Image: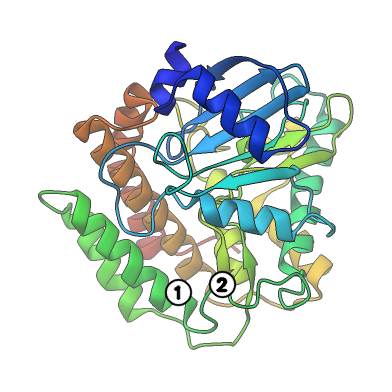
Amino acid sequence: MTEAATALGMTHGDLARYLSGAIPEFAGLRSVSKFGTGQSNPTYQLDADSGIYVLRSKPPGVLLPSAHAVEREFRVMAALADTAVPVPEVLHLADAADSPSGRAFFVMRFLPGRIFWDPALPDLRAPDRAEIYDAMNAALAALHDVDVTAVGLADYGKPGNYFARQLDRWRGQYLACVAVPDPAMVAIIDWLGAQMPAEDRRVALVHGDWRLDNMIFDAHAPQIAAVLDWELSTLGHPMADLAYQCMQWRLPNHGDMRGLGGIDRAKMGLPTEAEYVAAYARRRGLGQIDDWPFYLVFAFFRLAAILAGVASRAAAGNASNPDMARKYGAAVPVLADMALGVMRDGVDG
C-alpha cells in the first residue's frame, strides 16, 4: 500500500481493481500521488498504463452538513461538457456505498497546463497578463449565460432569495465551527442582514470559488483549458461570483492568500476592479450594478466562514493540508477587517 493510497483509505490493489471495473478504458494503475494543494477535498494523481487521471475524494472524519460535495462537482462538470465553459472530462463517480474507501470520490481526466498562484502574474509579459484576466472574465460571463434547464441543472439549487439563503447557510457553518464567534464576524452578519438587496430574480449557475488558481491555462497561450473546484457551485445570483473574484483587488500581494493590493496595475498591464466589472457587464448586456458594497462584504464574509471551517478541520485533525489550513484560519480576521472597511467606507466608483 502506498502512502497516498493509505491516506485515500484503500489499498493500491483495491483501487486498481475498482477503477478497472468502473472505467472501461482504465488499466494498469502504477502509482497514486497526492497533490499538495487543495484544502477541502483531497486530490490525487493516478498514473496508469492507460493514461493520467485525477481522483478527488471526500476527506475522512466527521464533516459539516452539505460540505465536501464531490457529487455536485461531478454532476456540474458533466453537465457543462458541451458548453462554452471549459471543464475537465469526468469519467466516474463512486458514492460512499460503492467506494472501496467508504468515501465518495470521482475520477476525471488529467489536463496538462499552467496554474497561476500569484494573481499579479509576475512571470508573464504585460499583454499576456491582460489576456489572462480577459479570459477569466469571458469564462465567467459564459458560465452565467448557461441555460441551466438545457444542461439538466434546473434543480441544482433553489431559485430566488440567494443571498438570504447563503447568509443563513454560512452563518450557520461559521457558528458551528468556532467556540467563540469573532465580534467582527457577528457585526458583518448583522450588517448583511440589514442591507439585504431586494430580490431581482436573477438566477445563474454560479461557481462559488471563481479565482485564478482554480483554473488550468493552456501551456502556451492565455486561454483557459479547464475550470476546477466546483464543490460550492449552485444556482444563485451572478454577482456572487463577480464580487468573490473582485476581493482579489483588495487582498495584499503577500502571504498565502495573495491579491492585487498595492500592485501598480497599470504598469503590470492588469485591469482595475472597475474595468473588470465593466467588461463583465458589457459581455452580459448589463447596465449599472447596484448594491456593489453589499456583494463585496458578502464575499469577504463567505470566504472568512469557509476558512474558519478549514481551520476547524485542522484542529480536528482531518484537514487535507493541516499547515496551510491553520494559515488560512489566521486569515479570517484579515478578511473580516476588509469587510468592515467596505461597510464603513463604501467602494470607489
Rendered view: 224 above or below 73:
above
**Residue found at x 80% / y 38%:** 225
Label 1 is placed on what type of residue?
A: Phe
Task: Identify the element where label 1 is drawn.
Answer: helix
Mark linked to residue 236: 2
Q: With 82 as the anchor, is 180 left or right in this view?
A: left
Task: Identify the element where label 2 is drawn.
Answer: strand
Which one is in front in this view, the residue at disc 2 or the one at disc 1? 2
Q: With 187 as the anchor, is 88 left or right in this view?
A: right
2 or 1: tag closer to the N-terminus: 1
Q: Position of residue 234 (x, y in %)?
A: 55, 66
Rendered view: 50 above or below 339:
above
Q: Position of residue 174 (x, y in %)?
A: 26, 56
- Check the picture and name the quadrant holding the C terminus: bottom right
* Nearer to us in this view, 155 or 165: 155
**Residue found at x 58% / y 52%:** 73
Do we see residue 50 in this rendering? yes
- Check the picture and name the quadrant holding the N terminus: top left
Rendered view: 211 above or below 113:
below
**Residue found at x 51% / y 32%:** 258
Q: With 320 as the anchor, is 86 left or right in this view?
A: right
Q: Position of residue 103 (x, y in %)?
A: 41, 41
Visual colour scheme: rainbow
What residue would you read off at disc 1? 163
* Nearer to us in this view, 15 or 136: 15
